Amino acid sequence: MRMLFLHADFVEYEPISKEIQLAEEGIPIAKKRMDDLIVVLTAVESEDDENTASDSSTEIRKYGDLVKCDQVLIYPYAHLSSNLASPKVALQILQSLEMGVRKFFPIVARAPFGWTKSFNIKVKGHPLAENARTITGQFKLSKSPDKSGNDESTALKAEETVRSSWHILEVGGHLVPFAEYSFNKDQSNLKTLTDYEFSKKRIVDEIPPHVKLMKKLGIADYEPASDSGNMRFYPKGKLMKSLLESHISRRISEYGGMEVETPIMYDSQHPTLQSYFNRFPARQYNVFSDNRQLFLRFAACFGQFLMAKDFQISYKNLPLRLYELTRYSFRREKSGELVGLRRLRAFSMPDCHALCKDLNQTKQEFLKRFDLSLRVLNELGISPSEDVEMAIRFTSQFYEENKNFIEQLVSKFGRPVLVEIWPERFFYFTLKWEFNFIDNIGKAAALSTDQIDVENGERYNIQFVDEDNTKKFPIILHNSPSGAVERVIYALLEKAARYSKLGKVPFLPLWLTHTQIRLIPVSSTHIDFCEQLFIELTKNQIRVDIDDRDESVGKKIRDSETEWIYYSLVIGDNEVKSNQLVLRDRVNKSQHHVSLEEIIKMIESQIVDKPYLPLNLPSHLSRRPKIMN
RNA sequence: GGUCAUGUAGCUCAGCCCGGUUAGAGCGAGGGUUUUGUAAACCCUAGGCCGUGGGUCCAAAUCCCACCAUGACCUCCA
């Protein structure tokens, strides 16, 4: 049975004439109207029976709970299916569905069966207002909610997900059904992830702490004049972003990714893109220009695939790695999902694809990228062994045929992982994994991810010439070794907040901080000496600034602390005379005598192999505007 | 869209329940004093259509209604 739920402000319908012989009798020819209701457009299919009807009424009840609505109109709508039941059976099942629904709703109506009807409906404008269901005897398919709609067919075509089974896969290959797995104390995050994915339960209701931190530290903020989920990044945040991006890009380049740049908007009528566009219309930003409907990309896939299609590729060139860091990818996520930097509508995403010759090469390449992801994430300051949990999803067929390979991934990760198994392939990929960061309010956010895509090579007509001189479609891997850059910042801030909660000193990685060392002159007469130090440190690619404001030393120290600056040097007469400096270390809460050379060495040793960018603020604090507290 | 919050100075907030001088504080900003030794020097000043619109009242930041904005949750995540 196929159903399309529409949460409507009102519906008006009027039977016009009998359409088929078996049409219901005694139907008054009069316009009917109902307000604030759920319209269930329904098509009964050939294999449907009383059970499907009963399952369907349960689905309607659930939807009613969801949108808090207690009126239902069952509206026969044959156009939903190309596999209709015979009219006689269909009417019976519709009647039985009606009976079922009456148990759950005080007001239930059914439009006459077998009649040509005119109808007028106003669908509500919220994300859940359109919802499609397919109910069969075997399993239940449900469709993700769609936007209030203009295009009904898109809602029907939209992606269906099957009910999947959940497991925990241990290192060594032991696969345990979720329900039978007992989590030990160290696995509380894995448990949280599982609960989050599986039962969709939350631990607590509060604002994630990174939202306050991103403002307080002058990293990022909401921009009320834009669409929500489009953030502004202050100088410190912009620097941090640039550094993260540059490091990620370098590692991908070392791995072999060829960096490219592709357009951010695409024609929604383009034949290759059309199916994608119609699949997720609710999540697109649309731009109308010159009578064309363009949509903003939600990933770098299109650009790279359209590009690869025009390459001349030999099997000798594979695996072929293409990389782009999108600034931006756009996803018009539902407003209620947007929180601080966790999920945005415009975000920067490293997106690296690899075209592979066959499954064998795919698996080798996949492992390589798994290592790359582990490494990158770790270098960014997010520890794979402490801060993230892994989830892996695949079809049962892929598992049966590639058990060893999957176990290899788990053993590389080194801890049990959450597994979702699909009975069939419903997406373009056969396997995907992701690293999930669990934040302080028990929400999971995916960072690194990789997928094995067996569909888009053909869809985009990307071909390579194989050894036997025939053209073939490659398998495509989709990897982001870090996940969205903004989300990395979110994870780092949440991690720092966790430290804070545990009574430790919160900090961000030294190589990402705007000021690595602050010079604090005791009085204005010491500023000259600070400037000499400044030149020396800057020459060694250390970001340094001078607090030359007319404030007390105590005040300047305090500000340095609240800005989370690792190192401060108070410069007074003693330092000018002796050349011995006293280094204040915020994280270790200590002070010790050192020389300038030692400081340079120490900082260099901590940021080794990380990119450097100069300070993105005036070097003298007296020249800086107040950006945030 | 639903539920629940919130909206007062650049920022963080108090005042609202129980209506009544000229709406307060801290931080920040401007001016001055101070030239400072490891987490907040001192003094002065300027900042407010109390989200918007209605209503009740002699009187509304305060009570009522509507709207708008923002957030959390519901839901979901190519």
Image (tube, coloured by chain):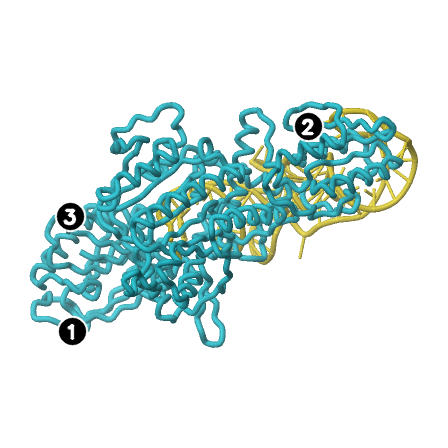
Distance between mark 1 and mark 3 Cα atoms: 36 Å
How far across and how far down the image is residue A11, in percent? Answer: 29, 63
Task: Determine whether the residue tagged by mark 2 lies in a helix, strand or loop.
Answer: strand
| Dot 1 or dot 3, earlier in sequence | 1
Locate the N terminus of chain A by quadrant.
bottom left
Image colour assigned to chain B: yellow
Task: Determine whether the residue tagged by mark 1 lies in a helix, strand or loop.
Answer: strand
Say few, some or many: other residues with alpha carbon within 10 Å of mark 3 (under 14 / 14 to 19 / 20 or more). Answer: few
Host chain of mark 3: A
Distance between mark 3 and mark 2 Cα atoms: 64 Å
Disc 3 vs disc 2: Cβ atoms closer than 8 Å? no
Residue linked to disc 3? A138
User: Which dot marks residue A17?
Assistant: 1
Image colour assigned to chain A: cyan
Kindly indicate the quadrant of the structure image that contains residue B6.
top right
Q: Left or right? Give the position of A550 relative to A300.
A: right
Distance between mark 1 and mark 2 Cα atoms: 85 Å
How far across and how far down the image is residue A578, in percent? Answer: 85, 26
Residue at 80% over, 27% down:
A580
Host chain of mark 2: A
- In the image, which is nearer the foreground, mark 1 or mark 2? 2
Q: Left or right? Give the position of A321 relative to A362.
A: right
Q: Give above or below for A268 relative to A201.
A: below
